[in-house]
């Protein structure tokens, strides 16, 4: 699962307005994707995603996910987006 594909999937999570802080240019980023979810409490989203089995991190109003190809599949990234879209907050 590449960060590029994950970037695309995260943009598709239209339930929330997401500001993706990680550069789109592969030469300017690593495996981590930093997301600011506009108009929502990052801590609340983090807690709910973690409760549902998603491994991630948050710092302030930023949620950080790392779709590392060695550990994560496309289905892992797809599940993250599906779970994010299903949150009832």
Image (cartoon, grey):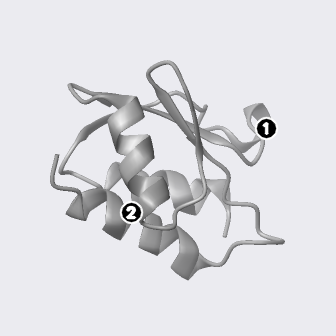
Q: Tell me what residue is drawn at x 69 percent, y 43 percent.
A: 32
First-in-chain label (2 vs 1): 1
Q: Split into 4 quadrants, where in the image is the C terminus? A: top left
Q: Secondary structure at mark 1?
A: helix
Task: Specify the label residue 27 is tagged with.
Answer: 1
User: Would you call the spot at circle 2 few (<14 residues within 10 Å), some (14-19), or many (20 or more)?
Assistant: some
Per the model, the C-alpha gap separating discs 2 and 1 is 24 Å
Q: Where residue 16 sits: x, y (%)? A: 22, 42
User: Would you call the spot at circle 1 few (<14 residues within 10 Å), some (14-19), or many (20 or more)?
Assistant: few
Tell me if residue 69 comes above or below residue 67 in the rendering. Answer: below
Q: Nearer the viewer, residue 2 or 56?
A: 56
Q: Where residue 67 sits: x, y (%)? A: 66, 59
Q: Nearer the viewer, residue 44 or 16?
A: 44
Tell me if residue 71 comes above or below residue 51 in the rendering. Answer: below
Please give left or right for residue 73 compared with residue 15 in the image: right
Is the residue under label 1 in contact with that under label 2 (CB below 8 Å)? no
Q: Tell me what residue is drawn at x 38 percent, y 63 percent.
A: 81
Q: Where residue 1 sits: x, y (%)? A: 66, 70
Q: Secondary structure at mark 2?
A: helix
Q: What residue would you read off at disc 2?
A: 81
State the residue lying farthest toward the top. Answer: 60
């Amino acid at each position: 699962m590449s960060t590029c594909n994950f970037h695309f999937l995260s943009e598709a999570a239209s339930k929330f307005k997401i500001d993706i802080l990680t550069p789109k240019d592969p030469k300017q980023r690593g495996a981590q994707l930093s997301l600011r979810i506009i108009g929502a409490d990052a801590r609340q989203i983090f807690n709910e995603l973690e409760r549902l089995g998603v491994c991630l991190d948050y710092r302030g109003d930023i949620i950080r996910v790392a779709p590392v190809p060695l550990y994560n599949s496309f289905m892992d990234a797809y599940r993250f987006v599906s779970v994010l879209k299903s949150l009832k907050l």
